[in-house]
Amino acid sequence: MLTSLQLKNFKAWRDTGEVTLRPVTMLLGTNSSGKSSLIQSLLLLKQTVQSPDRTIHLNLGGDELNDYFNFGDFDDVLTIGCTDPRRFELAFAFRRPAGERIQDGHFHCSYGKTSSGAVAVQELELLTDGRRLRAVRREKGAYSLFVDDEAQPRGKSRDFAPERSIALSAEAIVQLGAEGALAQDLSLAIRRELENVVYLGPLRRKPERDYVWNKSNPGEIGSDGHKAIDVLLASALTKNGGQGEIVAGVSRWLTCMKIADHLEVRQVGRSTRYEVVVHKDGVQANLRDVGIGISQVLPVLTVAHFAPPGSTVILEEPEIHLHPLAQAVLAELFVEVSQKRGIQFIVETHSEHVFRRMQTLIAQQRTQPDQCALYFVERDEATARLRPLAVDDFGTVSNWPPHFFGDSVGEARAQAQARAQRMRDHPYG
């Protein structure tokens, strides 16, 4: 699980400070305030770790099939007005499951631009259990290796350049001697943490009328959720799919949202094609023929049951096209699944209903304030600012920004004034 995140000079963020991440973390705020940049920083590292080029320092994207986001070039990432030094920094802390060699760790890396315009690691710092390993860029692309607080480097060479931001080269590991094994264990733990990040964006693919199933279970759901139906087919049609466990879980939440009674995967005649049928109030309909809200929330519900335990699921606007009751139920989904399946949720949302239900769940003691983190992101001219929302044991927020969810009292006052004025102008109707 990711336990904290910090960005410096990254897009809209001069310095986020240390952002605490919980099993359920919600990011709220106005449009273009910087919420998405927090999420994108993790996707940038994830797509770097997954790059086929192990010598790359940072994969800014460009491959539409394999990358999550195209960040442009170094200057597009660097905060506007950042001059000396022209660097940005990414850092996060994490906690791994019991039994692994690294339990708690911290990743911190700063990036600069070379004379050729490429992005290069300026300093990589890996920490765990009081131990610290560093690779610091020197002249002509050489890197010095440091252990703990040693003043003198263990060595300096261009062969010690970090790989994919998170790992030291084989030559550097050999040079570190006894600490080389620690460097390998730390890099592996960081890699696993980033590989366990699952992302579902705000634009989900519309459903088809039927699907061909290749009798395999997809490895991921896709950033637009296009593999969600494949996951449901595998769940319903294979023994390894848990005998429909994912389909049952999705159906249960659709019922809680009052938008369907249950889902059914049905073969189309004797063909190799299958359809997803939605049952509601005794009526059966193809997924293509029901409201778009179901098709848009289906990947959200599916990924919650499909992501392996220990995953960090990042969701942007999971509430899109849902009515208020269904939006509110999403908060219950995040809390229950995080508790039962060990899934961490980082959610970017504009929904008042999701947030209000989260407050209610805290008040009902179905979750605790230390199990969720709520943040409001706002803009101060060109710079993003993060406001942690202080929530007590009764779900009350003591520092809520005014008018973000509108001014309900002001609207009621305006309606009452308009009513009174009309009665004065037309006292007899």
Image: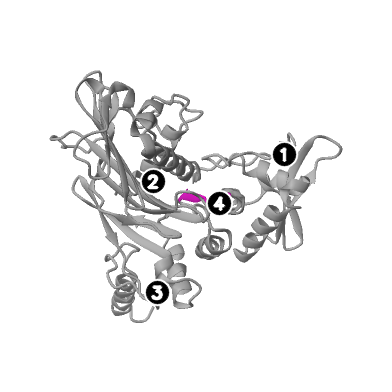
Density class for disc 2 (Cα within 10 Å; few <14, some 14-19, many ≥20) is: some
Q: Earlier in the sequence, mark 2 or mark 1?
A: 2
Residue that carries the numbered disc 3 in the rendered image: 395
Residue type for callout 3: Gly
Tell me whether the residue at label 3 lies in contact with that at label 4, contact meaning CB atoms closer than 8 angstroms.
no
Would you say 311 lies left or right of 183 here? right
Res 339 label: none
Residue tagged 1: 210
**Looking at the rendering, in which quadrant would you find the C terminus?**
bottom left
**The magenta stretch spans residue 312:** yes
Determine the CA span between mark 2 and mark 1.
33 Å
User: Circle 4 sits on which residue?
Assistant: 300
Amino acid type at mark 4? Val
Q: Nearer the viewer, mark 1 or mark 3?
A: 3
On screen, residue 338 above or below 220: below
**Helix, strand or loop status at disc 1:** loop
As drawn, the label of residue 39 is 2
Percent across and percent down for residue 167 are 39, 34
Q: Please state which amino acid type lies under the numbered disc 2.
A: Ile
* First in sequence: mark 1 vs mark 3: 1
Helix or strand or loop: what does disc 4 sit on?
A: helix
In this view, the residue in front, 233 or 191, is 191
Of the image marks 4 and 1, the number of the one nearer the N terminus? 1
User: Which range of residues does the magenta coloring cover?
Assistant: 308-316
The reply, left or right, for residue 402 in relation to residue 405 is: left
Q: Say which quarter of the image contains residue 255.
A: bottom right
Q: Earlier in the sequence, mark 3 or mark 4?
A: 4
Q: Is residue 152 visible?
A: yes
CA separation in Å, label 4 and label 2:
17 Å
Which residue appears farthest toward the front when viewing the image?
Answer: 178
Rendered position, 413 above or below 110: below
**Label 2 element class:** helix
